[in-house]
Amino acid sequence: MAAEEPPHVVFFPLMAHGHMIPLFDVARLFTTRGVKATIITTPANAITFSKSDNISLEIIPFPSEEVGLPAGMENFEHVTGDANDLLEKFLNAIVLLESPLESVLERLRPRPICLVSDMFLPWTVDVAARFGIPRVMFHGSGYFGMMVTDALRIHRPHLTVESDDEEFVVPGVPGEVRLTKRKMSPQWKKAVDDGQKTGPAKLMEAAFEAEKKSCGAIMNSFEELEPLYAEHYRKVMGIRSWSVGPVSLCNRNIEEKAARGKKSAIDKHECLRWLDSKPPDSVIYICFGSITNMSTAQLHEIAHGLESSGQNFIWVVKRPGDSKTNGSEEEEWLPSMFEARTKEKGLIIKGWAPQLMILDHVATGGFVTHCGWNSTLEGISAGVRLVTWPVFAEQFLNEMLITDVLRTGVSVGVDRYWDMVVEEASVGREKVEKAVRRVMIGEEAEELRRRAVELKEKALKAVEEGGSSYKGLTNLLEEVGSFHAREEY
Ligand code: UDP
């Protein structure tokens, strides 16, 4: 490689918004330090990656036909819920991306010196090895979630209890982590219990294997947030890691904050005008991420709960038909006259919301979240109090981190895992009302607020020059650079 050429790093995110959005931010962080970045994705996902200096986009075809998926179904959000055969096909399709990835790596100039790929693309570790470059893994989750998931896999403590509601303690991790089987993925549990490794469970197993062969992991976390668990990850699980987050903080201005992931369903100026009209710290924001869908019955309970809480709110509602190309009909998903009654206090966004922009607005004080790791960190970075409402994946563990360790939020009281589609109204309106009031008004809210603001300050410091995440990125780039020097590309 000619001396004047910048080091070139390739990023390959999983095709899901909760993975593409943060890895795009990571790529942007790399470019702020003189790296040339290339992102690899498929045609229907390209829109997520807005034009950015020093970031090139390589589009590889998605093998829809080969696996029997309808054209355009290239994102995780299309294959969730009841459509389990779609998920299986989607997972098969991802594996077929190996050869297109190789062609890109073959062709790219300057030659890439490192492949940063998602945890759920485990086979990329072998591709990188064939090209003689390191694979650095990117996680969608934090240290606590990774640590407990690993311990559950190794120790299988859930096998010691008789009923789904009996609590067990997760061994081999710092502190007392208590769980029930009902809060664990049934598919994953089944795979761990009787060795039937298919679908997502098989992928998870491959991910953990590939983790060991990777050069290390980039973590969207910061050292001050979960120091004990970061240490456990490195020393006990034996994986090298670099904390570089919260990566969402690289979005500094309104434009960047408003245009993340997808086109927003609301005009940003209209949204800002609405927020500007509310007193500081008076709005609760409700959003369940990019994939989760709620039954009409559950939406009704949320609506009633919000209304009787008496708080200002922005509520993001995603209906099954919004994201699926085979979309479904409109239903009566709001109680009658709800919008008219709450016109002054509420703003409903039907579809994609400019989440970062809303969370960072001074009027926003609380966030009802499904505890997806990105939303969790974005809430923490904005210094808002959280109402935790986990649904799937490691979200119940993120809830524990928020409510028991960081103590910047309260649980709405969910007691069971749903596979991304909440089919019943398992959280009643009283619980919604109570949790919202707890984080928005009164003494407890004030305590939560104090801790949340402290944590926000730590997050901001971490990413500033000289902060722990800034240094984490420096160390990672030195590592990548040292490989580059060794290999003399
Ligand atoms: N997001 C957004 N607007 C929405 C829904 C989600 O900007 O209406 C973003 C959110 O800011 C976060 C990501 O999408 O960065 C969702 O990731 P998370 O890990 O919270 O949840 P997932 O979608 O993976 O369940």
Image (cartoon, grey):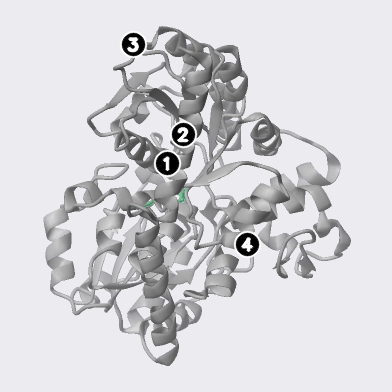
Q: Which residue is mark 1?
A: 474
The residue shown at (39%, 55%) is: 467
Mark carried by residue 2? 3
* In the rendered image, the vertical position of residue 346 relative to residue 216, given as above or below: below
Give the spatial CA distance, label 4 vs label 3. 43 Å
| Amino acid type at mark 1 | Thr
Q: Is residue 290 visible?
A: no
| Amino acid type at mark 3 | Ala
The answer to whether marks 4 and 3 mark residues whose Cβ atoms lie closer than 8 Å is no
92 vs 212, left or right, is: left
Give the spatial CA distance, label 1 vs label 4. 22 Å
Quarter of the image where the N terminus is located:
top left
Give the spatial CA distance, label 2 vs label 4. 25 Å
First-in-chain label (1 vs 4): 4
* In the rendered image, the vertical position of residue 437 relative to residue 424, given as above or below: below
Q: Which residue is mark 4?
A: 228
The residue shown at (60%, 17%) is: 129
The answer to whether marks 1 and 2 mark residues whose Cβ atoms lie closer than 8 Å is yes
First-in-chain label (3 vs 1): 3
| Amino acid type at mark 2 | Glu
229 vs 332, left or right, is: right
First-in-chain label (4 vs 3): 3
Q: Is residue 279 visible?
A: yes
Q: Position of residue 128 (x, y in %)?
A: 56, 19
User: Number of numbered discs present?
Assistant: 4
429 vs 67, left or right, is: left
Mark carried by residue 478? 2
